[in-house]
Every structure is written in structure tokens, then in C-alpha cells.
Image: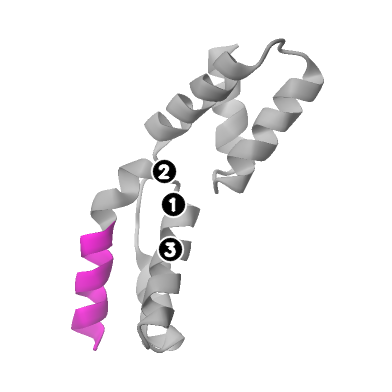
Amino acid sequence: WQERVAKIISRRQKSLHKESIHAFKQKVKNYLVVHGYNEELFMAQLEKLELPENLDYLAKECEKLLAKAQNRDAKTLYQIKGKLCRKGFSLRDIERVLEEKL
């Protein structure tokens, strides 16, 4: 079972460039639970999985939201941070990318 779980996780890693690490782990967890795998079986593998945060995707999403924004006041930036947090990015990474963009 461990080998099957590892194979599923590695297959799903190909879609990692389209989402944050948190969202990726959540989707893999949901997939495995729906398909009847025991949570104890795969949580250890997901936790020890070392994946670099995809800052390129975060920067692209940030640029899209900034382009849609009419003005760049504090309220708008707060809303952009909220939207990116909902997508699963960490606040620290969001602030770092926003500082670069502004």
C-alpha cells in the first residue's frame, strides 16, 4: 500500500506548478481518502515530502489580481492578500512578492 500511495503522490506532483503546496497536499489527501486509503498511511509521506514553494505561480496570480485592481490602496492590497491566502499561499510569501511588484 505504501508503494501505491507513493506512486499516486509522485503522479500528482506534475500538477504542482498550477497550485500552492498547501492546495496540492489538500487535493492529494482528499483524493486518497475518497479512494479508501487510510489517512495514517499517507500523512507521513505527505509530511516528509520536500517541495519548494512555487513563487513563479504566486507572482503570476499576484500580477493578475493587481492588473484587475483599479487602485492600489491599503484596502485593495488587503483584499488581494486575502484572495491569495484562500488559494493556499503563505502570508509571508505573498508579502514578499507584493513588495517586489509594488
Q: Which residue corresponds to mark 1? A: 21
Three-letter code, disc 1 = Ile
Tell me the residue at 43%/26% (across/down).
Answer: 60
Q: Which residue corresponds to mark 3? A: 27
Position in image of residue 37 (x %, y %) = 36, 87
Q: Is residue 46 left or right of residue 90?
A: left
Q: Nearer the viewer, residue 37 or 70?
A: 70
Highlighted range, magenta:
1-12
Foreground: disc 3 or disc 2? 3
Q: Earlier in the sequence, mark 1 or mark 3?
A: 1
Occupied quadrant, residue 92? top right
Q: CA distance from mark 2 to mark 1?
A: 6 Å
> Label for residue 42?
none
- What secondary structure is the stretch in magenta mostly built from? helix
Q: Secondary structure at mark 2?
A: loop
Three-letter code, disc 3 = Lys
Position in image of residue 46 (x %, y %) = 39, 69
Q: CA distance from mark 3 to mark 2?
A: 16 Å
Q: Which residue corresponds to mark 2? A: 53
Asked if residue 102 is positioned above or below residue 27 in the image, the reply reads above
